[in-house]
Amino acid sequence: MSHAQQAVPRRRSGDTTVVLVLGLAAMVVSMMQTLVVPILGIIQNDLKATTANVSWVATATLLSAAVFTPLFGRFGDQHGKKPTLVGVLLVMIAGSVLAATTTSLTWLIVGRVMQGAATAIFPLALSILREEIRPEKLHGAMALVSGTLAFGSGLALVGAGLLTRGSAPDYHRVFWLAVLLAVVALAGVLFIVPASRTKTGGRTDWLGALTLAALLVLFLLPISQGHQWGWTSGRTVGSFAGAVVMAVVWVVAERKVAEPMVDMKMFAHPPVLFTNLAGLMLGFAMFAQFIGVSYLVQMPEHVVGYGFGASVLEASVVYLLPTTLVSLVGAQVGGVLVRRLGARVTLAVGACFGVLGFTWLSAAHDTTASVIGAGMVIGLAISFGYAAMPALIVAGVPAHQTGIANGINSISRSVGSAIASAVITSLLASKTVPLPAGMPALPEESQFTLSFVIAGAAFFLVVVVAVLALKPDRAPVLKAAAETGATKGAEAELAAETV
């Protein structure tokens, strides 16, 4: 049976329930990335760890996600999305239980590695949506599931702050929250999500998986640890050099393997390539807003002359939660725009909102209302981008490559977030306010302004990509064709261009 024949789905009832379950699973994905950000200091104090060692609690998940996301995305395409999704959730639950019960930094990092596998849930969820949801509802469904990513990132910050408030904070509660949500998601997947019906089969490309994993680790490791190692140190420079070498090895290996994990033609296909570039910029801007605003509002105004002296909980609930709520609601609007105007236009409009939001934040971050208002505009931009990118990927690849293509797109956003973390952290540490001896170094206000300007520039690059690099969408063309009775001809033209 051909791929095209295998990809023809039998539409089922209960679309809404399936979408909600997959949205919950995707929310769990994004929570794993930001869950530990507010509690790294608590973990460091409780486990008597150094700053360099405790940073691995965050880095381990990033590296694990980079390794497992493309592997599981491809595995789901080959052997079934639902069983792969169930397996990933089980690994994530086991890792969360380990993190919630251990008092060893080593085992905590192992648990975080297992949690990182959860990132593969997102591309698997989008593959299931493409298989199960009616065409007229697909863009809205993908927008809802994608919107939960931004919502989950903010919810994790809020939840971590609430669960560790008080004079004796216990970080283990945060990981028990992850266990609870993952168990609920697993139950939903087991009982609601239909069994996979499209499987390409074939052998697992272990050589491609290993070389891609080595490439991503060598690239992301110095980005996440460069501020600790030193940006010109031998480890940092050597890792980047090794990443370049492994990139060449990976491309050569994938071009020679009969059934590659990543089809190089698909990887270099302009709609996929430029959507991944946009994903990298979007991931950068989103994380820059989370980190920048969180640090900014916690600055003690009586000491440095700016900031609001907010606690970690106040920073999450008062200043960041509105952004995440707008992202969740905006994802639905984004889905409508994708369906009516096309994903390319939606991405461009969202990126314009991002430029506006960061311009506002750069020029006026001296009042609570201004920081929250600008953050809400940025949240709208993020939700539009998250709604548009899956639609661009799905339109650019055949059905049997949906999982791996969205997996690579997820990695691009993770890489952008890692770069943002490194860039913003380095910027804030590079120029500090003169303070009396014994007080911790605090950044000058100009460094926050520069950080927001750079994030706005990232959104501007997304506008450029959407307007100049991506081709006009065919979705509105198909809609118009349907209204004139020429749907079959338009679909045939679209299919020919896509494959």
Image: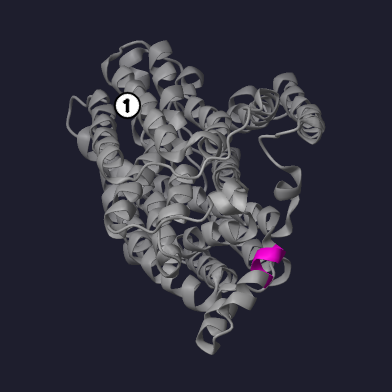
Q: Which residue is drawn at 40% across and 40% down?
A: 29
x then y, percent, for residue 62: 52, 32
Q: What stretch is highlighted in magenta?
A: 493-497
Q: Decide if residue 416 is in sight here.
A: yes
Relative to 38, residue 22 above or below = below
Query: Which quarter of the image is occupied by the C terminus?
Result: bottom right
**Which quarter of the figure has residue 160?**
top left
Q: Relative to the observer, which residue lies in front, 2 or 426?
A: 2
157 sits left or right of 70 in the view: left
Q: Relative to the observer, which residue lies in front, 428 or 467?
A: 467
Magenta span: chief secondary structure: helix
What type is the residue that disc 1 sits on? Ile
Q: Relative to the observer, which residue lies in front, 422 or 91?
A: 91
330 sits left or right of 341 in the view: left
Residue with the mark numbered 1: 93
Colour scheme employed for the rendering of this structure = one colour
Q: Relative to the observer, which residue lies in front, 347 or 306?
A: 347
Secondary element at tag 1: helix
x then y, percent, for residue 419: 60, 41
